[in-house]
Image: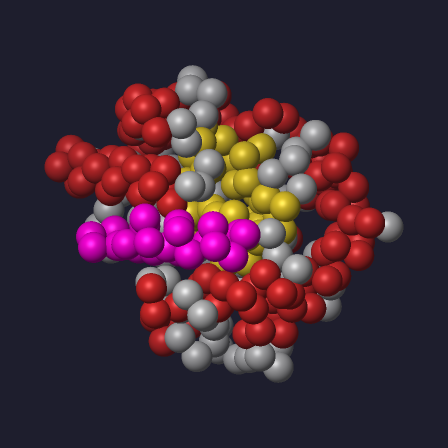
Amino acid sequence: MKFGINTLLWTAAFDLEHLDLLPRIREWGFDGVEIARFAFDGFPAGKIRAALEREGLGCTFCSALTGELSLISEDASVRRAAREFLADGIRVAAELGSEVFLGPFCSPVGKHSGRRPNEEEWKRAVDGFGELGKELDACQIRLAHEPLNRFETYFTTTAADVFRLCEEAGHPRLGVLFDTFHANIEERDSASSILACGSRLHHIHTCESDRGIPGTGQVHWREILPAIQRSGYDGWLVIESFGSRIEEIAAAACIWRDMAPSADAIAREGVAFLREQLAA
């Protein structure tokens, strides 16, 4: 398995000005970087890929549906815009050298309807994911959809939800992003949920229960990490946390206090903990 760190720990829009992070990330013991972007126009993916290669780092690429973008909207033009955004993201992932494009991709983060998802919304999600298959094949990219907790979405809150969605959409490049922060809220047994994903387990976020340093909270690492090993998953384990001083990220993720002495500490101490636990 490979260890990565999400750039949302330092910035909401990774760009050339942040390349000085890369040597530090490599020195801390990471194999790669998970680059986060929520707009793709003018993004210098080729130059960033070259910088990553110079540092000997791999890459994954994440985004999210925000604003009015939605695959499950009643409005066909909104759904079309969301599909176009996701197709653009798939192409950027390929240009960066990432093998996976990941994030919550059905409904805007923070969107609530005041009710359960209905059958029409589910069908739109299935159709929308299915229509991305051609782009995924053309770019040789896998898509990993992330279930969020109930406070951030009303749609797909468990790994089982996403597994079913991918199965019904029917494309082998569609899969689950399992995030231990959200799972700590929504899953009854995270280890069993990981194993139930089978070959649809495409990406993992190894996050603490408070988004702080892995190993300092309530996530059941002694059950989860062995389950990941038993599952046959051999991809990325990425620490995803959010900088408490980054205004737009702090507001979106409800980070109202410092989760660690510094952002760097979350990365540096977190990867040391995960490597130690897996070795044991």
Q: Residue at x 20, y 52 (%)?
A: 41
Decide which of 93, 85 is in the foreground and name it. 93
Asked where in the image residue 73 lies, by quadrant, the reply is: top left
**Where is residue 135 drawn, in percent x and y?**
30, 27
**Where is residue 45 drawn, in percent x and y?**
32, 50
Say whether residue 258 is left or right of residue 119: right
Is 200 colored magenta in this rendering? no
How many numbered callouts? 0
Say whether residue 245 is left or right of residue 68: right
Residue 263 appears in view: yes
Give the residues drawn in magenta, as a range: 36-57
Say whether residue 189 is left or right of residue 94: right
Quarter of the rendering occupied by the N terminus: top right
Is 37 colored magenta in this rendering? yes
**Where is residue 237 drawn, in percent x and y?**
62, 48
**Where is residue 24 drawn, in percent x and y?**
56, 68
Asked where in the image residue 130 lies, by quadrant, the reply is: top left
Residue 86 appears in view: no
* Colouring chosen for the image of the structure: secondary structure
Say whether residue 46 is left or right of residue 272: left
Decide which of 154, 236 is in the foreground and name it. 236
> Which residue of the protein is positioned furthest toward the left in this rendering?
77
127 versus 221 height, above or below: above
